Image: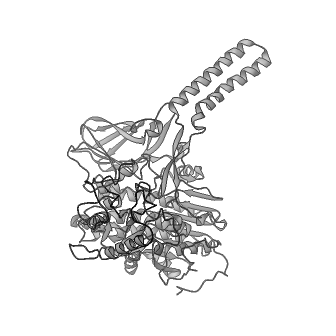
Amino acid sequence: MLLGPSLGLAQAPPGRVVILGFDGVDSTVVEQMMAAGRLPHLSELKTRGGYSPLTPTVPAQTPVSWATFTTGLDPGGHEIFDFLKRDPADRVPTFAVAEETTAPILFGKSNPVILGLAAGLVFWIVAGLLFVWRRKIVWFLVLDTLGVLAFLGVFLALRAWLPDTRPAVKNNRKGETFWSVSGARPATVMRMPVTFPPESFRDGRLLSGLGVPDMSGRIGKPAFYTSDPFFAPREGNDFSIELVRLESNVGTVSTKLVGPPGKPFGREGAIELPMTLTVSSARDRLTIDVGGQKVELPAGGWSGWVSTPFKVNPLITVHGYARFFAEKIQPEIALYVSAIQFDPERLPPGLAVSSPKGFAKDLVRRFGRFKTMGWAIDTWSIQSGTLDEAGFLRDVADTVAQERKMLAALLGEKSRLLFQYFEFTDRVAHVFWRLRDPKHPAYDAALAAKYGDAVEKSYETMDAIVGDAEKALSPNDVLIVLSDHGFATWRRSVNYNTWLVENGYLVLKGGVERKSLEALFSRGQFWESVDWSKSRAYAMGLGDIYVNLQGREDGGIVPPGAPYEALRNELIAKLEALTDPENGERAVSRVFKREQAYRRFDPRLIPDLLVTNRPPYRVSWQSSLGVPTEKVFEDNRDVWSGDHCSLDPDLVRGVLFASKPFRASPVPGIADVSASVRVLLGAGPVADAAGTPLW
C-alpha cells in the first residue's frame, strides 16, 4: 500500500536527506497523541508523506537496533546483539558494543630514549654548527654538555611520568555505514550510537554517540556529596554513583572531586582534584572552589560547565568539565555533580570523540560546551535517589536545548546527508513510566499528579524539533523521523538463571553474591558458585540463553548435534509456558533460535536462544549479569520502571515518518529504513541486507 501518490525512482533525485532519530518513541503513545491533536508537526508529516509503526530488531535494544539501521545488517551480521557478550573460554560478561585495548604512546617503551636523543640532538647539532662557524671549542663543549643534560632530563622525566601505552577502544560493530557511501557526501552524523571510536570517512563529519565514556571510563558515573550521615542510595540500584560523605554541614568543608582512573598512569585508585565547599552564614548559598574556579549556587541552583583539570604528574593533565547542582544546603548539604565529560578542546593523546578530531572542538567554539559522553542524560542518579524528578528534568531540558541549537545551525548548512540522534525520549520513559501506570509497584500518586505526563511532554518536545527541521527544508529535501523501538511498563522482573537452577539446567555449588555494573568495569568475579561439570545452560545479557556446549564453552558438557537441539527445543517449550505464580500470566512471548532471528552469525559469539518477554515483564538486572536470585519473579520497585530491552519486538514498536510516501504494509522493520536510505543516497544494497527498500 502506498500512502499518497506514488513517487518512483525515475523522478529527479531528492535534495538533502535529513534524518532525525529519537530513541525509544513508542508507536501506541504517538498514535494516541496524534489523535488528540498534540503532535501537529508529526501529524502534518504523516499527511504529506507517510507514517507507520516500526518493528525493532531481536532484541529490541538501543545499540542493536541503531547498528542495524547504520549498516542494514541484522544483529548476527553486525555482531551488536546485546549490551553484553561473553567469551566462551571463561563466560565472563563484557560490553558487546566495544572492548578495551591498549595502544602505544608515540614510540612506546622507546619513548625515553628516542625523545631524549631528539632533545639532545638539538644541542649537538647547534654545537657542531657553531664550531664549524666560529671554531671555538668552549662553545662546542658547553652545548655538547647541555645536549647530554637535555637527553638525561628528558629520558628520566619520560621514564618516570609518561606511560608506554594508553587505553584504547575497539568498536565491535561490523558492516558499512550508510553515510560512508559516495552519494551521502558531504555528510554530517551527530551522536549516532555505536560510533565510538569515530571512523573517518570522506567529506564527512561525525560526533560519536553511545559508547563514548565519561572521564571515569564508565558510561556515566555522577557523584553525590552529602553531610547527611543517614543518607543511603535507594535499594535496588545496580548502577554506579560516587557517594562522598562530608564531615560538616556548615563553614568550609574540604573534599575531593574524583577523576580518571590512575591505573593507566601507574597509580593506584583514581586521580583526584581538591575541592572545598563553603556554606554561607545565612545557609542559603554554597560556594564551590575547584580547579582554580569558584561557583556560588543557591539551593536548587545549577552551575554552568566548570573546568576540572586533573593533574596526573608534571607532564600530564587530563582536562574535563562537569556541572554542579545544589539540591539542598540546609539542614544538610546535598550536592549533585554530573559525570565528568572529556573536554573536546583538550583531549588526551589518542582520544577522539569526533571525526575529524577537530569537529568536536569546533562545536564547542560555536555552541559552547556540551555533553561528550555517549549516555548523555544521567538516569543513574534519579534511580539511586541522589537526584529528584525536577532536577532530572532540568538536566534533560538543558541537554535538549544545546542539541537543538546545534541542529538549527546544521540545518542551515547544505550537507547532502544530515543525521541527528536524540536520546531524551528514551531516558524520560525509562524513569517516568511508573507515574503513568497506576498498577506499577513504584507508582506514586503525588508524583504522578506533577509528572505523570512527562513522557507525553517529551514527545511534544520531539514534535517541536521536527517542526524546526520542516521549516528549514526545501520541498525537494527528504525528512525521515524514526525511533529504534517502543516502550512498555515493567512491573515484574524474571530471572532466567534462577529458573535454570530450579529446573536443574544450572547447578550451584555454593551461595551466590549480588553483582553490579561496577563488577563489569573492574573485571570482577563471575559464576564463582556454578558447577560447570553439571550445568547444561546459563543466562546472560537481556534475554540470552547459552548452552554449555562441548568444544565451545570451557568445560562444556552438552554434545553438539542431536543432544544440543533436543536441549534447545526443551528449553523453548518450557520457557514459553513459564507463568508468574502471583497472577498466572505468561511472562515469555517467544523464544527465538539464533538461526530463526539472524541470516548469518558467529556461533561462538551469538546466543543459542533469545528469550523475549510480554509486558509487564522484563529480565531482571541480576539475571543479565548471570546471578541467580531467591525467586524467579520479583516486583520491580525501581524508578527505572519502563523498558523494552527483553521484550518481543512486535510488542514494542517504534515509529517511522517520512516526507516521501512509502510502503507501510506489512509493518516495516528498521532494516527496511536502512535499505530505503541507501536508495535515497543512490547506493546499492549491502550484502546480506536484512531489509528491503520502502520506495
Q: Residue 598, position in %: x, y? A: 49, 72
State which quadrant residue 572 falls in: bottom left
The residue at the point 54 percent across, 65 percent down is: 419
Rendering colour mode: one colour
Q: Quadrant of the C terminus?
A: bottom right
Please say if 47 is above or below 17: below
23 or 95, which lies in front? 95
Residue 20 higher or lower than 527, as above or below: below
Decide: is 457 above or below 304: below
Q: Position of residue 557 (x, y in %)?
A: 39, 62
Residue 287 in picture, x, y percent from top left: 33, 40
Q: Is 275 on the left-hand or right-hand side of 248?
A: right
Evaluate whether residue 610 shows in this view: yes
Q: Nearer the viewer, residue 247 or 301?
A: 247
Q: Is residue 614 visible?
A: no
Q: Nearer the viewer, residue 290 or 73?
A: 73
Tell me what residue is drawn at x 23 percent, y 77 percent: 584
The total number of labels drawn is 0
The location of residue 42, given as percent across then percent down, is 46, 75
Figure quadrant of residue 12: bottom right
